[in-house]
Image: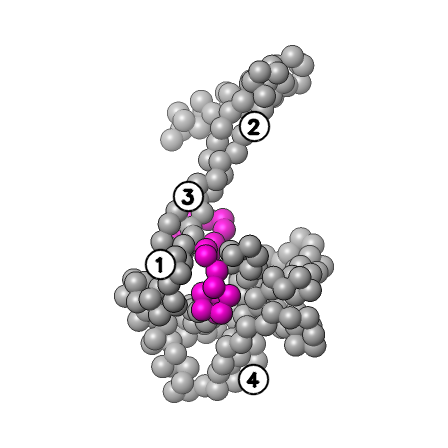
């Protein structure tokens, strides 16, 4: 870009937490997780065993079960804390396409006959990507998300034999408990100084960087 007359700037996009399985079993992985995470999941399972009928399942193939899971995921997501999807048909379409190609790992946690937590993972090329998750509010003390994540982690490590599990975007503190490595994604922005619009945009960008540095 520079050799053709552009001025280029590099900027931080996001942190990315991931885990390299190195052929280890889930048992070996789990034994090395922070004690607070292991104890949280173990306590949550005991609470569930004591007061509820519950189970987890991981769906991967096209069929009636996946169609029901699509509806359940939509219901859980609509009741969760998350903002509505800007394109309502995207997630159902992605789930169906991933199921059709064998990439889908859709985890569900059933509680007293109802799906109350759901996660969409994608497995391809030896990597499991944790793509979307949601749970129904009101069950925070049961740590449903952590229980379901542990079940999916066990599935992709022991059944799919993935080499890597990727938490994708974000430096959320909880991701550090599940993952072992961090990397950064960076972006490049380029301006064509030979055109007045490019030069003007570069000036605004350059001035903005100095202002942000001064404010910080």
Say whether marks 4 and 2 touch (CB < 8 Å): no
Colouring chosen for the image of the structure = one colour
Along the line of sight, the residue nearer the viewer: 26 or 215: 26
Residue 160 drawn in magenta = yes
Vertical comparison of 51 with 90: above or below: below
Q: Which residue is mark 1?
A: 177
Vertical comparison of 11 with 182: above or below: above
Disc 3 element: strand
User: What residue range appears in magenta?
Assistant: 155-174
Please report whichever mark, 1 or 4, sits nearer to the chain's N-terminal start.
Answer: 4
Please report whichever mark, 3 or 2, sits nearer to the chain's N-terminal start.
Answer: 3
- How crowded is the residue under tag 2: few (<14 C-alpha within 10 Å), some, or many (20+)? few
Disc 2 element: strand
Quarter of the view holding residue 78: bottom right
Q: Which residue is mark 2?
A: 189
Give the Cα separation between the discs numbered 2 and 1.
33 Å
Residue 183 is tagged as 3
């Amino acid at each position: 870009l520079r050799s053709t007359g552009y001025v280029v700037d590099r900027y931080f996009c996001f942190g990315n937490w991931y885990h390299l399985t190195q052929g280890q079993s889930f048992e070996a992985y789990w034994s090395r997780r922070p004690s607070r995470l292991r104890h949280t999941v173990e306590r949550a399972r005991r609470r569930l065993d004591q007061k509820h009928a519950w189970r987890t399942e991981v769906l991967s193939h096209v069929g009636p079960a996946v169609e029901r899971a699509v509806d359940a995921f939509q219901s859980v997501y609509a009741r969760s804390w998350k903002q509505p999807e800007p394109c309502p048909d995207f997630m159902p379409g992605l789930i169906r396409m991933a199921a059709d190609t064998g990439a889908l790992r859709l985890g569900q946690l059933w509680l007293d006959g109802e799906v109350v937590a759901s996660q969409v993972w994608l497995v391809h090329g030896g990597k499991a990507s944790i793509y979307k998750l949601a749970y129904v509010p009101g069950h925070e003390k049961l740590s449903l998300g952590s229980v379901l994540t542990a079940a999916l982690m066990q599935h992709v490590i022991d059944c799919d034999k993935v080499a890597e599990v990727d938490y994708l975007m974000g430096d959320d503190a909880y991701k550090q408990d599940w993952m072992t490595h961090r990397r950064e994604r960076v972006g490049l922005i380029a301006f064509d100084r030979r055109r007045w619009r490019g030069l003007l945009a570069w000036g605004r960008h350059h001035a903005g960087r100095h202002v942000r540095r001064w404010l910080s």
